[in-house]
Amino acid sequence: MKQCILILAILAGAAVASGQDMRQNAARSLFADQKATQVGDAITILVVEESSASNDATTTSSRESNISLNASGQAGGSSMPTVGLGVGTGNTFKGQGVTSTNGSVRAKLSAKVDSVSSNGNLWINGIRTITVNGEEQTIKISGLVRPSDITSDNMVFSYNIADARISFEGNGIVSRAQGPGWITKLLHWLF
């Protein structure tokens, strides 16, 4: 009887314990680094963006026209008055313009995988909001990441993100102080 109960307990334990599906843990190897590969996985984004553009243009144009007519004559022994006509025009233009812009952004934030494309690329989306002394800064990032661009510490640089949308927005005392007042806005709207 004791043997029968022991055998039933072993069979019940075996029925409860099920085999592990190795495909579930294929991305989680004991010997490889953990990288984002599935929907819901987190990935660290290192935003390193620098932009610089300049444009320099110089134009010089000059135009000049002169028309003149001279006539003189003599009849018999007396000379006739000399007639002269002159017309002149001139046009000069000189233009010069310089445009220059520089920008630099550095930040680090986490994003999560929203979906995985059929070729294995990852669509990511992340938001980070930081509030210091009433000043709120929000960083948003989204785009497409190739698994080969993910480093061994599960990080990707922003310049490796395809279709990247990166925005930095601020809201608070400093942001309001940088904008024009309502009287200035009204005057700009009127004029």
Image (cartoon, helix red, strand yellow):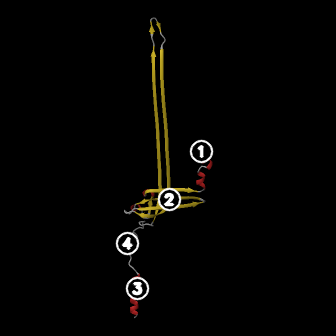
Give the CA separation, mark 2 to mark 1: 35 Å
Tell me if 155 is positioned left or right of 136 in this view: left
Quick one: SS at disc 1? helix
Measured along the vertical axis of the image, is residue 17 above or below residue 121?
Answer: below
x, y (%) of residue 66?
Answer: 45, 24
Which corner quadrant holds the C terminus? top right
Measured along the vertical axis of the image, is residue 106 above or below residue 12?
Answer: above
x, y (%) of residue 95?
Answer: 49, 36
Nearer the observer, 182 or 1 = 182
**Residue type highlighted by circle 4:** Arg
Rendered residue at 49%/49% (across/down): 102
Rendered residue at 45%/18% (across/down): 69
Give the CA separation, mark 4 to mark 1: 67 Å
Choose the circle earlier in sequence order: 2 or 4: 4
Q: How many marks?
A: 4
Q: Which residue is disc 2 drawn over? A: 140
Choose the circle earlier in sequence order: 3 or 1: 3
Give the CA separation, mark 2 to mark 4: 33 Å
**Residue type highlighted by circle 2:** Lys
Residue 190: mark:
1
Residue 23: mark:
4
Choose the circle earlier in sequence order: 4 or 1: 4
